[in-house]
Amino acid sequence: MAMEKQLGSDAARSAASLQESWARIRGRLREEVGEVEYRTWLRQMTLVGIEADEIIVHLPTRFLRDWVRSHYGDRLRALWQQEIAELCRVDVRVGPQPRVAAPAGEEDNAGAAPAPQPGLAEALTSRAPRANGADPRSEWSAPLDPRFSFDSFVVGKPNEFAYACARRVAEKPAFPGFNPLFLYGGVGLGKTHLMHAVAWAIRGGAQSRNVAYMSAEKFMYRFISALRSQSTMEFKESLRSVDVLMVDDLQFLIGKDNTQEEFFHTFNALIDAGKQIIISADKSPSDLNGLEDRLRTRLGCGMVADLHATTYELRISILQAKAMAAGVNVPKNVHEFLAHKITSNVRELEGALNRLIAHANLFGRAVTLESAQDVLHDLLRAHDRRVTIEEIQRKVAEHYNIRLTDMSSARRARNVARPRQVAMYLAKQLTSRSLPEIGRRFGNRDHTTVMHAVSRISELMQADSAFAEDVELLRRMLET
């Protein structure tokens, strides 16, 4: 397709001018959506050219095409019309990725990260969900929440890996290396949302699959009921006939040996039959003390994906998405206020926003910072617990099994220096103390030492997920 095609009857655009416009548009998108979102969804867009009064853009997969059309189509058209007023639309298509020079400040498209796999966007749109989310083919499945879809899940760095794994399983159940899929993380971070989204997507797919979603508690009660009624064979046959088994909050089975044994045998039977299993828990398989070793080993043999505590940026994105979905104008300063104050989990964050919106609708008032402080006073007071530097030092010293005096000592051995840096990092994150004051509490160290510790711990958390999980665990312990 020639880049020099005519736009209308009298506006010829050269390849060079189009590429300049394209570079400006990509730059604006990058600033608007942020680096993580841009690299995830928009980086692999390729400008092809003009046909009649529309711009043609290529993406490598159907999934990316559908996502960009749905979430960024209007914005792309608006940005292009700022460059070329005669344009009527932007057509995003699936096409090959030519090796072209990337816009300034970006790597070549050929070096981009692998794209999410195609074929997932149709999963939620090809079949409307039932009112209560129940699957008539499975007597096992609990109702699914229609709000919990992939489209409504806000993706950020703390959850992007778990999200990508869930989408892969939704597209290709029992895909090698992803069976079982084990999702873990703290309360209110999105595990249940992802499990419901996977169930909706699989049920809405082209193939007819029997999906059973339940809590570990329900699994146990059904098993006990089968024992009492002497119908264990029916129990086994019914459960093992499903195509996809999803069990939420597996930690509930800790200490329940008979139920664990039955779950282990069910697990093996389904895996051997090529059926997909998806599990969620609050800890990784290796940390679920109280589960049988053979079960923990089997749970860890597939794909294990964690959901970290939300970042400030992700909390802002979640609030913006929820406010937009509700059709309510929430000022930027209210988003920032809530994201700073409510850091424990997404459920409380959404609950706070829902209270604000309900108050505004009931009384016909606009959402303001003042109304947020008034309506949410009880919730905010609960989150105002002050964490002290001394408390941080004590908790970190206990966690890493070092002496409390090592926090302020001159020792530089790695087993002491690293916990000390972690404590400095948490002191910066969880207290309002200045860098010089934090340094003084750690043996009269200079503020530049604290800056280095914060920077070093941030780098290690990005490079090592296990270390990041360790630090986030400490953070949660201190905040609760």
Image (cartoon, rainbow, N blue to C red):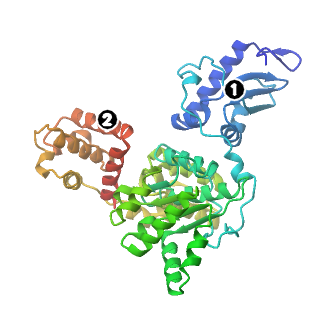
Residue 389 seen anywhere in this rendered image of the structure: yes
Identify the residue at the far right of this view. Answer: 9
Q: Residue 214 placed where, x, y %?
A: 55, 68
Residue 185 seen anywhere in this rendered image of the structure: no
Q: Which mark is residue 455?
A: 2
The residue that appears at 75% across and 56% down in the rendered structure is 127
The residue that appears at 60% across and 55% down in the rendered structure is 198
* First in sequence: mark 1 vs mark 2: 1
The residue that appears at 48% across and 67% down in the rendered structure is 265
Tell me the quadrant of the picture where the C terminus can be found. Answer: bottom left
Q: Badge 2: how crowded within 10 Å, few (<14), some, or many (20+)? A: few
Q: Is residue 317 left or right of residue 344?
A: right
Give, as a three-letter code, the residue at label 2: Ser
The residue that appears at 22% across and 45% down in the rendered structure is 419
* Mark 1 in CB contact with mark 2 (< 8 angstroms): no
- Measure the C-alpha gap from mark 1 to mark 2: 40 Å
Image depth: mark 1 or mark 2 in front: 1
Q: Residue 319 placed where, x, y %?
A: 55, 52
Identify the residue at the far bottom of this view. Answer: 229
Does 167 appear above or below 417?
A: below
Residue at the disc numbered 1: 96
Does 91 appear above or below 402?
A: above
Instruction: Give the SS element for disc 1.
Output: loop
Closer to the camera in the image, 26 or 205: 205
Does 100 appear above or below 183?
A: above
Q: Badge 1: how crowded within 10 Å, few (<14), some, or many (20+)? A: few
Does 301 appear above or below 249?
A: above
Closer to the camera in the image, 376 or 29: 29
Indicate the quadrant where residue 111 lies. top right
Instruction: Give the SS element for disc 2.
Output: helix
